[in-house]
Image: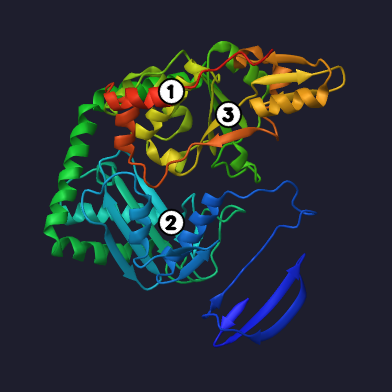
Amino acid sequence: RSFRDGKVRIATFSKGELQNDKMQDTEEENGTYIFFEPDPTLFVNYCFKPEYIETMLRNYTYLNTGLSILYNGHRILSRNGLEDLLNDNMTATGLYPIVHLKGEDIEIAFTHTGQYGEEYYSFVNGQHTTQGGTHQSAFKEHIARTIKEFFNKNMDYTDIRNGLVAAIAINVEEPIFESQTKTKLGSTNMTPGGVTVNKYVGDFIKQEVDNFLHKNTDIAEIIQQKIQESEKERKAIAGVTKLARERAKKANLHNRKLRDCRIHLNDPKAKGLEEESCIFITEGDSASGSITKSRDVNTQAVFSLRGKPLNSFGLTKKIVYENEEFNLLQAALNIEDGLDGLRYNKVIVATDADVDGMHIRLLLITFFLQFFPELIKKGHVYILQTPLFRVRNKKKTIYCYSEEERINAIEELSPNPEITRFKGLGEISPDEFKNFIGKDMRLEQVTLRKTDAVKELLEFYMGKNTMERQNFIIDNLVIEEDLAS
């Protein structure tokens, strides 16, 4: 429905064909109303993730300042563009107010935080390019170069960008994307035969960021202090970093912990399968053995942990290189220098559903949040859901992921079905495991709410044993009974 100046035009479509088109009077304010429902004959068993849709709509408002969107009665509005995007999504406090700069066909916003790594939000013509591309690469290069030239000191680009949270949006004529999902920009020019994306972005940053730093010396001083702290830490672990890299390089040639797959996220020969690439992080030989024997060797890799990993909360990045398992995991994922080289689209934690398994999940999530928070923020980390029960009779087998599913399965397969309670991944045979990591694989994405501050979150759950945490545990105790009988 399109509402304009007291008139509304209503168009109805089905399977792409116009079914109805009419005009009538209205008292509604100007705007557009869209209602859609997937055709169940084309989309079977579909479902929507409300938070995903809301994020997408919010991105539209960030890129169109002043645009108001009513989503199921909830108003979404941005007055400050990319500045609002960073404020709404940052999980750590900025060290200085967000720098927000606009030009013709380009807008950027950035600040530094106390977290490790770099985090970017990039857009082309309103499309969220989650895998970056030429515009994001240009931003990363020129923001570091401009800051280095401003201070006129021998600074390392990695030190300059450490802790950087930034957003860039550009408009490109006839954009070319590298993937079918349009999540990575491949265009080298802003217009056909025109100035390159790299030069356009670089010239804007060189002029605007340099001018900003000259006018705001207090912010420039904070940035310089942050860079010096990053440099100091990097040099402090330089020796162990070099040794760890050499160790990881040798291990990669014969890495018993990694059973790699053939297709990876940034593989140009993937033929559309790159987004199916995943790696299962398992604990123990029996669990990794079952997954290894039942996996798809083209797109599914397996990384085996030896027992529980270290609690990395409060430790510096030096531990990533000193701890062999963390170092090999970092190397397997190829994320030491950021997510640009990430080898797998999904990093799947596959542990038992018992107390020890939950603890391993927590320790791994702590590791990622502490040193590679963008891996979780960009939606790459998942928990593998495995069945708690197997209910079967002579004709049919049903795998149940909850007590409710178990009750329904018993009712369906009655009388007297055989009920098995799985107490660990190692109890599931490779033949059965194929059912759980194939097309019907159940995954729970690890997400951060916009209200979650990473530092405080980790402090509460992984820090000192405070009275607040003890009370939280007591209030959330769950007593499980043996439900297999």
Residue 432, quarter of the rendered image? top right
Residue 209, quarter of the rendered image? bottom left
**Label 2 to label 1: alpha-carbon separation:** 30 Å
Q: Which residue is mark 3?
A: 384
> Which type of secondary structure does the marked residue at label 1 adopt?
helix
Q: Between label 2 and label 1, give the one nearer the viewer.
A: 2
Q: Residue lying at the far right in this picture: please name it.
A: 395
Callout 1 amino acid: Leu
- Upstream in the sequence, badge 3 or badge 1? 1
Question: Crowding at label 3, few (<14), some or many (≥20) Cα neighbours within 10 Å?
Answer: many
Pinpoint residue 159: horizontal percent, then vertical percent: 25, 42
Q: Quadrant of the C terminus?
A: top right
Question: Crowding at label 1, few (<14), some or many (≥20) Cα neighbours within 10 Å?
Answer: many
Decide if residue 456 is on the left or right side of residue 56: left
**Label 3 to label 2: alpha-carbon separation:** 29 Å
Name which residue lies at 62% across and 39% down.
276
Question: Crowding at label 2, few (<14), some or many (≥20) Cα neighbours within 10 Å?
Answer: many
CB-based contact (under 8 Å), mark 3 and mark 2: no
Pinpoint residue 380: horizontal percent, then vertical percent: 50, 39
Residue 435 appears in view: no
Q: Which residue is mark 2?
A: 122
Residue 49 appears in view: yes
Decide if residue 141 is on the left or right side of residue 184: left
Q: Which mark is residue 328?
A: 1
- Upstream in the sequence, badge 3 or badge 2? 2
